[in-house]
Each structure stands twice: as structure tokens, then as C-alpha cells.
Amino acid sequence: MGADVFDQVARDYERIHNRSLPPGVRSDEFVAQKAEQLVAWIGAAYRGREMRYLDFGCGNGRLFRQLLESPGLRPLFDRGHLRLFGFDTSAESLKEAEAIAGAGSVCLVDDFARFPQAVRFDFVISCNVFHHIPPAERDGAIDRLAAWTAPGARLVIWEHNPLNPFARLIVRICPFDREARLMTLPAAQRLFGRRFRYRRHAFVNVFPPGLQRLALLRRIEERLARVPVGAQYWVMFETP
């Protein structure tokens, strides 16, 4: 996942990302968008017992902070029913994640062997990570995730849509995306379909997340969710 690159940008990740985006579009809006969707997904998957959540490629932990501050998840945290875990190959990013999320609030590792051996994850998300993994190494990463997920677990991959020219332009501009190898939705479905069962998907960000606060644009965005025009997509799988 280009650990050396992300070690170099860990402290300034948000500022660098903002410079790669159009005027008026901010990096934190994309994090908030993912957090809003995650709160809904976690709430729907919760079954009244301890739930273990993994962010695979968690970076500097901004998504953890959004989840920890979410009123919708606060009852689960208060009862000890939602535990947060993060994996990343960048040691500097993990240091930032601990500072941003709060020491002790998340179990953070750079090696799966450092997770408690009894842990199996009920919900896994990987946001804009797999395009940094060399194609020859992706099967291995997926096999590792499959080995650590519980039966019936949900896994969501959130990626840039290479069919969208704006997405390709942003990736080309962004300093830490220069070696990225984007994958289409069908490619992601084939790749993960070896170990997981497909559930559903959506294309997102026809409009930047900030503009989707406008009701009209939000409705247009929702109606185009099945059309491959959005700058990003997410696809949900489950453990058989």
C-alpha cells in the first residue's frame, strides 16, 4: 500500500489532499460522507451483541474519529458492544490515527499477527486502499481478510471509479496516488467474489459530498446510484 509514501504524508495528508481537489471541495467532506453511510450500515448489521469493526488501510484515523463522535453509535460504544480495529502498513499514519482517534480507543496494528488471535471481524471497510495494492498482491490481501472475518460478516470496498474522467484526473494530480492502479466495479466483484458473496453496490459522488446537502442534487445523486457515472463506488460483500 505504498507505506513509504504514506509515512511521508501522514501528518499533512488532509492538507495535501485538499490541494488536489477543486476549489470549494474539502477532504473532510468525503470522510463525513463515508462515516454517515457506515453508521447506517453498522446499525443495520448490529444484532445485540459485541460487534468488531475493522478499517483495513485506516490511514490517519479520521474515519475513526467520525464514528466515535457519532450520536448514532454512542449507545453501542457506551455498552461496549462496538470495538474498533485498524490496520495499515504505514507506521507514521498509525501514529497519527492514535492521536486523532484518541489513545486506547482503537486497536491499531501494522501486522495482522498483532491482532488478538480470538478476534474475528463482523464488519470490514476498506476505503480507497486497494488501488494502492499491486494487482499481483490483491488476492493475498483478500485471503487475509477472509481468514479474519466472522461468518455472515459484511465487507465494503470503497474505490475510485476509473470510468469517471474527473476521478482519473484527481488521481493523476494527487501526489500519493501517482502509482495507483484503479479497478472497475466488475473487476472488484470478480476479485472479491472468490472469497465473499456479493450483496449490493452503488456509484456515488456525481456531485461532491458538500453539494449533496442540496435536496435536488441529493435526489439526482440517488437516482444515478446504479449508473457508472459517479467519481467513486462502493460494493458490499458478505462472508458465506
Image: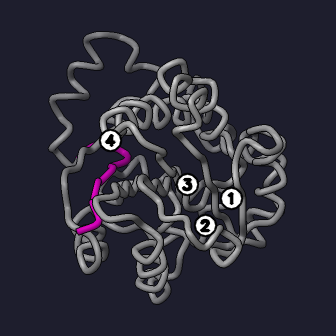
Identify the residue under disc 3: 55
106 left or right of 120? right
- Amino acid type, callout 1: Pro
Residue 18: give x, y in percent of width and height. Answer: 67, 37
- Amino acid type, callout 2: Arg
Q: Residues within 10 Å of mark 1 (few under 14, many from 20)?
A: some
Residue 152: give x, y in percent of width and height. Answer: 28, 59
Identify the residue under disc 2: 178
Label 1 with label 2: CB-CB less than 8 Å: yes
Judging from the image, what secondary structure is the residue with disc 1 in? helix
* First along the sequence among labels 4 and 3: 4
151 left or right of 209? left
Identify the residue under disc 4: 45
- Examine the rendering and report whether any part of residue 157 can be seen: yes
- Examine the rendering and report whether any part of residue 168 can be seen: no
Residue 175's label in the rendered image is 1
Q: Residues within 10 Å of mark 2 (few under 14, many from 20)?
A: few
Query: Where is 217 relative to 179, above or below?
Result: above
Front residue of 185 and 195: 195
- Amino acid type, callout 4: Ala
Report, in whole angstroms, how far the alpha carbon at label 1 lies from the one at label 2.
6 Å
Residue 1: image quadrant is bottom right
